[in-house]
Image (tube, rainbow, N blue to C red):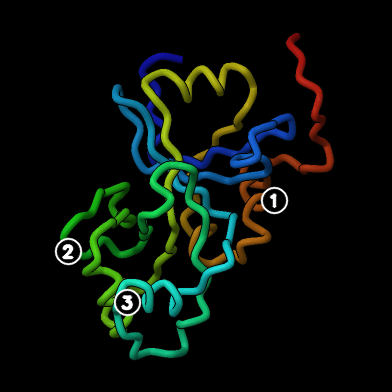
Amino acid sequence: MENVNLTNQFLIAMPNMADPYFSKSLTYICEHNEQGALGIVINRPIDLTLSTLLDQIDISLTHAEIGNIPVHFGGPVQMDRGFVLHRPLGEWQSTMKVSDEIGLTTSKDILQAVAEGTGPNQFFLTLGYAGWAPGQLEHEISLNAWLTVAADTSLIFDIPVEARFEAAMHLLGIDTMNLSEDVGHA
């Protein structure tokens, strides 16, 4: 599985995934190269809202209608740091271009813009990210820990969080009722 690039792909946790951080998770891979991989779990809301987060970092929310937007668990790495998946890309202080339409931003200026109503049209806010060392993700895939599929970004921004895992499986033509937790090799 060398020289594979899973950037802009979904990782779907297999039923046998024992790691509690990733069990039944759907992860969007933002970067995958020879240095490893970085992804954002997109189906794990946490007990924190946008308005509470903005209060904690001294940003005033002028658009109260977005205050109840949930913050999500993005992964177990740097869980004290915010990550914003968004479209369109825009021009922010610290943005990684994932695709022509999606960016991952870690700078405070995007949160200020969101609070003022001048931010990106669509955004998904997390604390933390998922990271893999060089070759680690490929090894996990070879052990049947993950399925991969090309990302449909409407899943991130338009599908309710509780329906995302199932929707990603449908991209592969798989019904989750047909998956087994038993791992085997032919």
Distance in Å between CA atoms under marks 2 and 1: 33 Å
> Dot 3: what SS?
helix
Q: Earlier in the sequence, mark 2 or mark 1?
A: 2
Residue under label 1, please give it: 166
Residue 163 lies, in percent from the top left, at 67, 59
Marking on residue 31: none
- Going by the numbered disc 2, the residue's amino acid type is Glu
Q: Earlier in the sequence, mark 1 or mark 3?
A: 3
> Dot 1: what SS?
helix
Does residue 67 lie above or below 180 as drawn? below
User: In the rendered view, does 43 fall on the left or right side of 130?
Assistant: right
> Dot 2: what SS?
loop
Q: Earlier in the sequence, mark 2 or mark 3?
A: 2
Q: Nearer the viewer, mark 2 or mark 3?
A: 3
Residue under label 3, please give it: 114
Does residue 32 lie above or below 57 as drawn? above
Q: Is residue 140 or residue 170 the one in the foreground?
A: 140
